[in-house]
Image: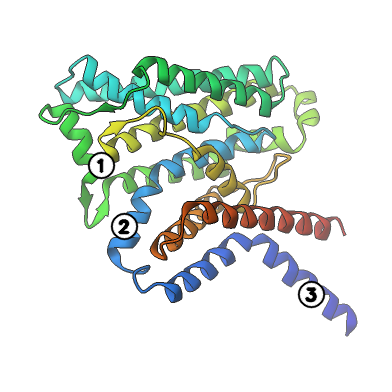
Amino acid sequence: MSKVKTDNNFELKKFIVKNNAIMIFILLVVVASCMSSNFLTVNNIMNVVRQQVPYVLVAIGAMLVMMTGGIDLSSGAVLGVGSCVIALYLQKLQITGVNGLLVGLLITVIVGAIFGALSGFLVAYCKIAAFIATLAVMTIAQGAAYIATNGQPVRLKAGTPAADAMINFGKGKFLGIPLGVYVALVFIIVFLFIVKKTAYGRLLIACGSNEVSVRLSGINVKRYKLTAYIIAGALSSLAGTFVTCRAASATPSTTGGGYELDAIAAVVIGGASLDGGKASVLNTIIGVFIMAIIGNIMNLMSIAAYPQKVVKGVIIIAAVLLQKVGSRSREG
C-alpha cells in the first residue's frame, strides 16, 4: 500500500514538474481575470497577442541556442539593429515598391544572421564562453545601431507603398486577429517540425545533452552550434521589423532593450535546461505569454514597471528551482 502511495506521489511530482509552465499560465490567467475585469476583453487579449510577436521570434532563437548549452545576450541588441536597418532602408533609399520592401526584409534578416554568425563563431570555434561572446556582440550591435542612425529616431514616411505596407501590416487584422500573429504561428509550426521531426533538431538537442558522444560519433558539433546562433540572430533581426511596423519608427536608444532577458526567461520558464539538451517550442511560447500576462495585469492595475521586474525575477527563480526539483526526482 505504501509503495503504491509512494509511486503515486512520484508520478504527481513528475507531472507537476513536466507541466509547470502550463499550470503557471492557467493560474496567472485565473488570477489576472479576477484582478481586472478588462483582462479577458477582446481588445486587451488582441493587444497582448500583437505585442508578443517579436518576443515569440526572439524566444525561439534563444531556445535553439540554449539547446546547445549556450546563451544569447545579444538578441535584444540585434533586434534593435534589425528595426533600424529596415527603417533606414525605406527612408534613405526612398523605396516605393512593395518588392523593394521584400528585399529590405531579406537584407534585415541577413544582417541579423551575420551578428548571429559572429556570436556562434566566437562560441563554437574560438571557445569563448557564450555569456562573454554574446555580451561583446551585444555591445557591437548597439554601437552599430547608434552609428547607423546617429543616435536619432528613424521614422517611416507615410505616403509611399513600401512604408504604408509596413505601417498597415503593423495595424492590420484578418478575422479580428493581428496579421503579425499569423506570421508568428507560421514560425512556431516550422520550428515545432524542425525540433521534433528533423535530424537537425534532434542533433541540436544531442549537442547540448551529450556533446562528447555526439562529437565522437562524427557529428560536427561546432557547425550545429554555429547554425543555432545564426538562426537566433536572423529571427531577432526579423523581430525588429515587427517593432518598426507597430511603432512606425526605429529608436536605437530604446528598441530591443530587455528583449533578450525576457526571451531567456520565457525559455527557462518553459522548462529548458540551462545546461542544454532540453527545450520545447510550445512550452517556450507558453513562457512568453506568462511573461506577457505578468506585465499586462500590472499595467491594468497601474503598477509601475519596476515592481514588474521584481515579480518576473521571482518567477524565473521559481522556474529554475522547479527544474532542480525535477532533476532530483529523475535521478532518484
Q: Circle 3 sits in a helix, a strand or a loop, which is it? A: helix
Residue at horizontal 70 percent and vertical 40 percent from the top: 277
Residue at horizontal 68 percent and vertical 15 percent from the top: 125
Label 1 sits on residue: 170
Q: CA distance from mark 1 to mark 2?
A: 13 Å
Amino acid carrying label 2: it is Met
| Residue contact between numbered discs 3 and 1, judged by CB atoms under 8 Å | no
Where does the image place residue 20, in percent across and percent down from the top left? 63, 62
Among the 4 quarters of the image, the one containing residue 53: top left
Return the residue nearer the eye: 198 or 209. Answer: 209
Question: Which label sits in the foreground, 2 or 3?
Answer: 2
Query: Residue 46 — which label?
Result: 2
Q: CA distance from mark 2 to mark 3?
A: 40 Å
Q: Is residue 233 above or below residue 323?
A: above
Quick one: label 1, few (<14), some, or many (20+) residues within 10 Å? many
Q: Can the viewer see residue 302 in this picture? A: yes
Q: Can the viewer see residue 220 in this picture? A: no
Amino acid carrying label 1: it is Gly
Q: Earlier in the sequence, mark 2 or mark 3?
A: 3
Amino acid carrying label 3: it is Asn
Q: CA distance from mark 3 to mark 1?
A: 49 Å
Q: Circle 1 sits in a helix, a strand or a loop, which is it? A: helix
Where does the image place residue 99, in percent across and percent down from the top left? 20, 23
Q: Is residue 318 above or below residue 29?
A: above
Q: Earlier in the sequence, mark 3 or mark 1?
A: 3
Label 3 sits on residue: 9
Q: Earlier in the sequence, mark 1 or mark 2?
A: 2
Return the residue nearer the eye: 23 or 73. Answer: 73
Quadrant position of the C terminus in the picture: bottom right
| Residue contact between numbered discs 2 and 3, judged by CB atoms under 8 Å | no
| Residue contact between numbered discs 1 and 2, judged by CB atoms under 8 Å | no
